[in-house]
Image (cartoon, rainbow, N blue to C red):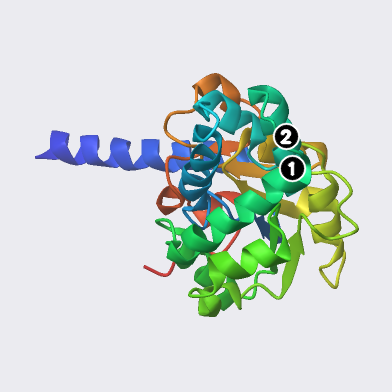
Amino acid sequence: MVYSNQIYILSILYIFKNTQRIMAAFTPVTHVLFDMDGLILNTEELYTVAFQNIVSKFGKNYTYELKVSLMGSQAHETADRIIKALDLPLSRDEFVDISKKEFADLFPTTEVLPGARRLIEHLHKHNIPIGLATSSSVESYELKTNHHQQLFSLFPFKTFGSDSEVRQGKPSPDIFFVAAGRFPDKPDPSKCLVFEDSVNGVKAAKAAGMQVVMVPDSRLDKSYTKEATLVLNSLEDFKPEVFSLPPYDD
């Protein structure tokens, strides 16, 4: 019995020390920025369907490799790169117009991804300043979030890829600099934590001098996740306290 108690105590000490070690690896933050597509909403799946529908008309395939290289790009950047990569007989404007028709059918079906609602509501409840930093245009955002308005109303500040201040899409850090500047107290970038799912998004956050939690697609090669501060399989696995944020109540 004494031996069992010793094992139990040693186990508790190990867990405590390991938790301390993990927490020491991260810098405390005061503000949080969220990407949207593929992180809060399942729209990356819908983008794949939409773009494949378009390129199929020309006998082309929208590969996962091409998708990874595009995630986080602005709409016009995405159009240019797909046209060039697949040698499509379309102009940028033609591709964008066709895309909008696909999106109009698909985006109203968006679903919130596991763990996203709980985390956003938790941070809001504890008065942690949060903001949205999405490469989506305002028009696209409205389509995607129309039936999730209560959740997205918790973001007092939203920055879109279509904002005039965001000159370049991810992996440029523009959107995160602009988003951080919209908090009333203008925090230092080092005090901001970013949640992202894309490689380009991680690069953008790091370039902005911010820590970034990555929740990548399960198909993504692990070598692409090395720049992230922390990599998770799901937002359900995130523990706020490791970044000195209030822990979950339950």
Residue receiving disc 1: 205
Residue 236 visible within the image: yes
Residue 211: percent from left, percent from top: 70, 43
Residue 232: percent from left, percent from top: 47, 40
Q: Which residue is drawn at 50% across and 37% down?
A: 52
The tally of labels here is 2
CA distance separating discs 2 and 1: 6 Å
Residue lying farthest left? 1
Q: Which amino acid does label 1 sit on?
A: Ala
Q: Which of 81 and 20 is in front in this view?
A: 81
Give me the disc on residue 203: 2
Label 2's element? helix
Label 1 crowd bin: few (<14), some (14–19), many (20+), radius 10 Å: many
Label 1's element? helix
Residue 113: percent from left, percent from top: 43, 56
Q: Which of 4 and 248 is in front in this view?
A: 248
Image vertical order of residue 143 relative to residue 243, above or below: below
Quarter of the picture containing the C terminus is bottom left
**Side of 76 relative to 127 (left or right):** right
Q: Which residue is drawn at 67% across and 32% down?
A: 82
Q: Quadrant for residue 139, please give it.
A: bottom right
Q: Mark 1 and mark 2 in contact (Cβ < 8 Å)?
A: yes
Q: Nearer the viewer, residue 62 or 213?
A: 62
Q: What residue type is labelled 2?
A: Lys
Q: Residue at x 15, y 33 (%)?
A: 3
Residue 230: percent from left, percent from top: 57, 38
Q: Which residue is drawn at 42% across and 58% down?
A: 115
